[in-house]
Amino acid sequence: MATYSNNMKQDLPSDREAVLRVAAMPKESNTGGSIFGGWLMGQVDIAAGIIAIQRAAGRVATVAVNNFHFREAVLAGDLVSCYAEVIEVGRTSMTIHVDVYSQRHLGAPGAAVLHVADAELTYVALDDERRPRTVPEESVDEP
């Protein structure tokens, strides 16, 4: 089960590359000063979708958010980085895991890296008529 407070200083994952990096802007913040959870969920869907498109070698659609854990608040000015990977492939679908990190006070002494969220989403591969199709054995983009 997720722990919802991890104020320990961390590093970004060194064993994989971020799929998406975006600065959290003030217009995305709620009255409490944190970035809207829905905005963060959207960024996760974009990152996971990129990986799903690559693995499916074509169009996909999000069919489920299997789980989503908010661990820490994201603040305006944070650099949000999403790391995504395929964890399961079925006949027409695939499940993608995403870890989200926030770099706070970027470039300043005492800059912090926080693991702010993680999620699992399921996508289905689609044909040209937007109907489910078989996920290829290997993606064109995979080494």
Image: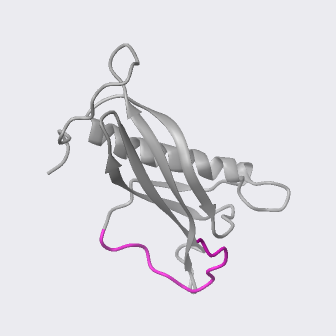
Q: How is the image coloured?
A: one colour
12 in magenta? yes
Mark count: 0
State which region is magenta: 1-15
User: Is 134 positioned to the left or the right of 9 in the image?
Assistant: left
Give 112 or 126, whichever is nearer the viewer.
Answer: 126
- The residue lying furthest to the right in this view is 31
Give 89 or 99, whichever is nearer the viewer.
Answer: 89
User: Is 97 positioned to the left or the right of 141 in the image?
Assistant: right
The spot of residue 21 in percent (x, y) is 47, 56
Q: Residue at x 54, y 49 (%)?
A: 66
Q: Residue at x 59, y 56 (%)?
A: 68
32 in magenta? no
The spot of residue 54 in percent (x, y) is 29, 41
The spot of residue 85 in percent (x, y) is 35, 56
Q: Residue at x 37, y 24 (%)?
A: 132
Q: Quadrant of residue 87?
A: bottom left
Q: Is residue 10 above or below residue 51?
A: below
The quarter of the rendered structure image containing the N terminus is: bottom right
Q: Is residue 1 above or below residue 50?
A: below
Q: Quadrant of residue 14?
A: bottom left
Give 3 or 99, whichever is nearer the viewer.
Answer: 3
User: Is 49 positioned to the left or the right of 5 in the image?
Assistant: left
The secondary structure that dominates the magenta segment is loop
- The residue lying furthest to the top in this view is 129
Q: Residue at x 58, y 44 (%)?
A: 42
- The residue lying furthest to the left in this view is 143
